[in-house]
Image (spheres, helix red, strand yellow):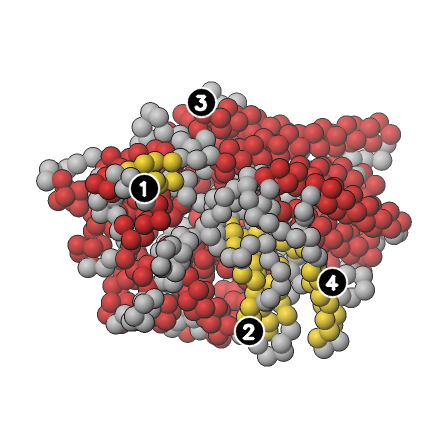
Amino acid sequence: MEGIQRERPNLLGSYFLGLLIYSSLVFLGFAPNSSAQTEASVVQLMPKLFYFESAQDLQRYYERSIEDLEKRIKKLVEIPDGRNFLLELDRLFGFFGEKMASFHLAEVALADSKLREEASRLQLRAYVWWNKEVIGRIEIHRKLRHVEVDMDRLAPKERRLLDGLQSNFRHWHSADSDSEESKLLAQQSAINRIQLSQNIEIAENLFQRNINMAKATLIFAEEDLRGVPLEYIKDLKLKDGRYQIEAAEWWQFDLIMRSANSATTRRRTYRARESIAAQINDLLIPQILELRRRLALTSGVSNWATYQLEGLVFESPKELRNFLLRAEKRNRPKFIAEQTLIRKMKSKRMGRSNPEIYLYDVAYYLNEYVKDELAVDLVGLRDYLEFEHVLQVIFEQMETSFHLKIKRSQVKVWDQNVLAYDVYERESGTRKGRIYIDPFPRDGKDKWFFSLSLNDRFVDQDGRVHIPSNLIVANYPPASEGAPALLSMEDVETQLHELGHSLHQILTNIDYASLSGMNSQEDITETPSKFLEVWMRDTEFLSKLLVHHKTGERLEPEAINKVIEALRVGSAHRRQGQIAKSILDLELHEAENSTQSARQIEQKIYAKYFYPLDEKSFPLTSFSHLFGGYDSLFWIYELGSTLAERIENLFLSEAGSILDPAMSARYRERFLSQGGIQLSRDLIADLFEMNRNSCAKFFNKLGSHRITRDSP
Ligand SMILES: [Zn+2]
């Protein structure tokens, strides 16, 4: 539904990570945890995560980290050009990522808001340092270019590594040549870029913080909340009998939007959430857009959209726009059909014909339709979705599908609710990685749902495998007085989505830090996550998933089928919203000297592709994705949905089930484990067994129709 947004994966080599600053409370000890173990003859290393107790701890950690990295850089630049230099440079990326992991974690985990701000500040400083000392450094860039001389001696994988690393450096050194004059120009250009990217980081950081720190607290009397199952919000009841709803908390917002009978209640809640940081972020948006445009200009590209698309499956804004318009055309009839359902339901409830539909009506009337016509109470299904049970069922399915063993780890964590799991190969017992899950809201914690790469897999100079770890930050409804934590169906889908990212990161077989796990090309980043969501459409999976938390009752197969049908209702709206946002994102970043403000562009796009916005609405200001993380790459969600459908169809046509272990093994081997070692196009071609030619056709038509058995 409207307003959904998910994770910002931490893509190493992207300098515009949304840096987040938080406020408030939990306690952590300073306790490095590390373990090295031998499995077969390969030594594995679980990199240390540091928890900080004071600003001095942070400062010391920062200094030690920089000192260590400086030593590595010093050794690196002494290596003569060639293969060893290439491999060592990649390892430097790996070590840098490991150092930064503790800062990422500090931002999520630290109780003290001042400490969190300090962690953010030092993290930003570290990125600036990295850009200056590594990416912006002409000496390293030159050596990297000279590796090409050795090209014949490089294995194909190493050539791809060279290409991937060069793409990190290329933009920073466009004027590089050997004459003194152009050397000076190159230096000037690098300094310019460092400053611009630093300013972008700071502005994005503020943008995110404004959203995360904001509150949108509403007080409702019981009669305002008719339709809302009050047992799910009993902990929000005030002494005077009214209810305090925090629209900034996703689960509270979602519950109101789906179930409150009163249009006034829904409208108030919707507007409160949407305008959460409107005034301040309204000022930041044009600044961020302008800084990005200028950064693109320093690379000789006229706009940010073009800059971001370099090397991806859609190579120009025009190609991308065509993909999005094809997808829109395909989805529109289903979107309109759902609008008809909504109008019919609203007309039935209101007793008047042809009523107007507003965005805050959508989730509610679709839910009413499902109740009336399919006799499914989606909101009430929470009673069948106790959090720990849900995790157990998902993990068991992951074990079966992907040949794994997942064990709870007793490693020290930062909050009593945080869970840690180690993932092993089922047959060999080799540890593949670690997943942390931080499931519930906490004061000052980021309010969204995302999967964060803490550290990437790579093999160091001593042949040790550094084991990757991934963190899922979520905000599910917490346990309440007398009841365990109960999820909604959408929460389960979100959990699958985030675990799709986790698997992408930790099931990787790639030994290079800059290409392993989630460090694929950005275009397919949202494909593994969208694919795991597909499990929600499988009867076998749902029949294991839905178990009443008190009675242990399970649903009959017929009821399960109805649930699946019910889950499809609204999917065209979700898709339409996703496409509209992608087009908006493209348009904002394609503009070279637009006379229209971001707000005007947003109103135009919403009116054309989704729903007209009222005068006060400005959803962009509360939507963190486009201004910190996925700027002008929001379309990768739509690509992810499209590719996930294709992969689903491949599973169904080859094996009859999306849970099939043999197909899952093929998917894992050819796609999931490959990171960025091949270009996305080649990964897709390999998965679907297409030749280069039919793969080109595949992308030219992508979005326009569903796959059939004979034409992948
Ligand atoms: Zn995602």
* Secondary structure category for the residue under label 2: strand
Residue under pointer 3: 596
Do we see residue 224 in this rendering? yes
**Spot occupied by residue 649 in the image (x, y as percentages of width and height):** 40, 64
Q: Earlier in the sequence, mark 1 or mark 3?
A: 1
Which residue lies most toward the front here?
A: 239
Q: Is residue 696 left or right of residue 74?
A: left
How much space separates mark 1 and mark 2, taking CA atoms?
48 Å
Between marks 1 and 3 in the image, the one whose residue lies nearer the viewer: 1
Circle 1 packing at 10 Å, graded few (<14), some (14-19), many (20+), is: few
Between marks 1 and 4 in the image, the one whose residue lies nearer the viewer: 1
Residue under pointer 2: 405
Between marks 3 and 4 in the image, the one whose residue lies nearer the viewer: 4
**Spot occupied by residue 166 in the image (x, y as percentages of width and height):** 72, 46
Circle 3 packing at 10 Å, graded few (<14), some (14-19), many (20+), is: few
User: Contact (CB < 8 A) between labels 2 and 3?
Assistant: no
How much space separates mark 2 and mark 3, taking CA atoms?
54 Å
How much space separates mark 1 and mark 3, taking CA atoms?
49 Å
How much space separates mark 4 and mark 2, taking CA atoms?
23 Å
Quadrant position of the C terminus in the picture = bottom left
Q: Earlier in the sequence, mark 1 or mark 4?
A: 1
**Label drawn at residue 308:** none
* Secondary structure category for the residue under label 1: loop
Residue under pointer 4: 459
Residue type at the position of mark 3: Gln
Residue type at the position of mark 2: Lys
Between marks 1 and 2 in the image, the one whose residue lies nearer the viewer: 1
Q: Earlier in the sequence, mark 1 or mark 2?
A: 1
**Residue closer to the observer: 691 or 419:** 419
Q: Is residue 688 left or right of residue 568?
A: right
